[in-house]
């Protein structure tokens, strides 16, 4: 599969490694990296910071803004690596319909315990560890109908996971 001029979305719950893997993958692919968290409106960040899970209504305009940013970044034919939770199938469908370049998705699958341990050690992020349960509750793991989605168990270092991403994209 050629990924030149496409978007590779790294998805999963908060703390699954989307940003770290996404940045490393973008560097390896000489691609532009975008973090969907950077496009949350202030109201969403305030809710999450206060420990209030986002609703579908909160997420829809954010997802539209993310897709618009991907389209802008990829308009010159460059590859984009996007870190985005995309927890529900409907979110992935919306992104797939809105992003104009070919979209390949890699789901970073982790256990609740693995992610909780990571989140408890993470500092400086607006997503508190106590919202992790709501992330897993909202998560609809990709199914067989989502043909352009690859599931990777998150075990090992960021480099190991990044190398696994590169291998599955080839």
Image (cartoon, rainbow, N blue to C red):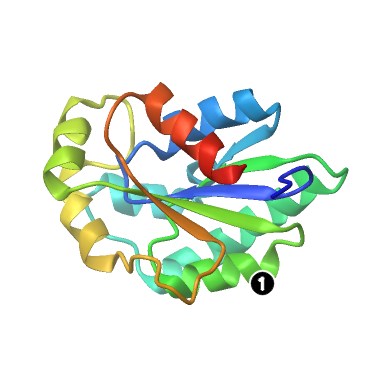
Q: Position of residue 17 (x, y in %)?
A: 36, 36
Closer to us: 97 or 153? 153
Q: Position of residue 44 (x, y in %)?
A: 41, 54
Position of 167 with respect to 143 (left or right) is right
Residue depicted at x 88% and y 43%: 76
Taking the image as shown, residue 38 lies to the left or right of residue 67, namely: left
Q: How many marks?
A: 1
Disc 1, SS = helix
Q: What quarter of the picture does the C terminus occupy?
A: top right
Where is residue 43, by image quadrant? Answer: bottom left
Q: Which residue is mark 1?
A: 97
Task: Please name the residue shown 71% across and 56% down the image.
Answer: 68
145 relative to 122, above or below: below
Q: Residue at x 76, y 57 (%)?
A: 101
Q: Residue at 38%, 62% (x, y): give it.
A: 87
> Quick one: label 1, few (<14), some, or many (20+) residues within 10 Å?
few
Where residue 34 sits, quadrant-wise, is top right
């Amino acid at each position: 599969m050629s990924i030149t001029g496409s978007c590779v979305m790294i998805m999963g719950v908060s703390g699954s490694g989307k940003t770290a893997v996404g940045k490393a993958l973008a560097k390896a692919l000489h691609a532009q990296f975008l973090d969907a968290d950077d496009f949350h409106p202030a109201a969403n960040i305030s809710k999450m910071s206060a420990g209030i899970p986002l609703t579908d209504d909160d997420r829809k305009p954010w997802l539209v803004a993310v897709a618009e940013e991907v389209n802008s970044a990829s308009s010159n034919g460059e590859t984009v690596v996007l870190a985005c939770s995309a927890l529900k199938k409907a979110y992935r469908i919306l992104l797939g319909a809105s992003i104009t370049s070919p979209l390949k998705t890699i789901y970073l699958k982790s256990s609740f315990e693995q992610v909780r341990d990571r989140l408890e050690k993470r500092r400086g992020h607006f997503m508190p560890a106590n919202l992790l349960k709501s992330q897993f509750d909202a998560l609809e793991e990709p199914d067989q109908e989502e043909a352009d989605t690859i599931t990777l168990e998150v075990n090992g270092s960021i480099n190991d996971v990044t190398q696994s991403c590169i291998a599955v994209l080839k």
